[in-house]
Image (cartoon, grey):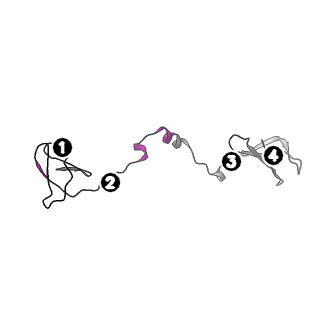
Amino acid sequence: MAAIGSLIFCTDCGNLLPVSKGSEKNILHCECCGAENRDRPSRTVVTKSKPSDFPSLLRQKLDIVQTVVRHELNTERIDSNTECPKCGKRGIRYSEVQQRSADEGSTILYNCDCGERWSVNN
């Protein structure tokens, strides 16, 4: 008798044997070739797989996405045309962020060296 998971096969012909009824002798008779096969206790089969075992287009796209830590990302630029409303200095540092929904414009955050901060929604 050969067992694969909870399925039991005849060792002579390979036919699938009927489930044991729990008799004292635990002998299974093959209906195909008539061989007697001794029933053994069923075994628990555990399988393990890795995500790479099942390739998919979505998983490939997700692998491309990179995690960005906000404090390590420097997106500030200098706008030489903008003037600080507090001190009048030109050449203000700014960064552009998407704070609203994706179909709306981005928000420009301005930071002057004098400490003045303001934002403009585009």
Residue type highlighted by circle 1: Asn
> Between disc 4 and disc 1, whose residue precedes?
1
Q: Are marks 2 and 4 in contact (CB under 8 Å)?
A: no
The local secondary structure at tag 2 comes to: loop
Q: Quadrant of the C terminus?
A: top right
Q: Give the extent of the magenta segment.
A: 33-59
Q: Is residue 122 left or right of residue 27?
A: right
The local secondary structure at tag 3 comes to: loop
Q: At 75% across and 45% down in the image, what residue appears?
A: 107
Instruction: Identify the disc placed on residue 92.
Output: 4
Q: CA distance from mark 3 to mark 4?
A: 15 Å
Instruction: Identify the disc placed on residue 74.
Output: 3
Query: Is the residue marked by circle 1 packed among few (<14), some (14-19), or many (20+) residues within 10 Å?
Result: some
Residue type highlighted by circle 3: Asn
Q: Nearer the viewer, mark 2 or mark 3?
A: 2
Q: Residue furthest top?
A: 57
Q: At 81% across and 46% down in the image, what residue appears?
A: 92
Q: Nearer the viewer, mark 4 or mark 1?
A: 1
Instruction: Identify the disc placed on residue 46.
Output: 2
Q: Tell me if residue 115 comes above or below residue 91 in the rendering.
A: below
Q: At 12% across and 59% down in the image, what residue appears?
A: 25
Residue type highlighted by circle 4: Ile
Residue 1 position in % (x across, y down): 16, 50
Residue 54 position in % (x across, y down): 41, 42
Instruction: Identify the disc placed on residue 100.
Output: none
Residue 33 position in % (x across, y down): 11, 43
Q: CA distance from mark 3 to mark 1?
A: 68 Å
Query: Is the residue marked by circle 3 packed among few (<14), some (14-19), or many (20+) residues within 10 Å?
Result: few
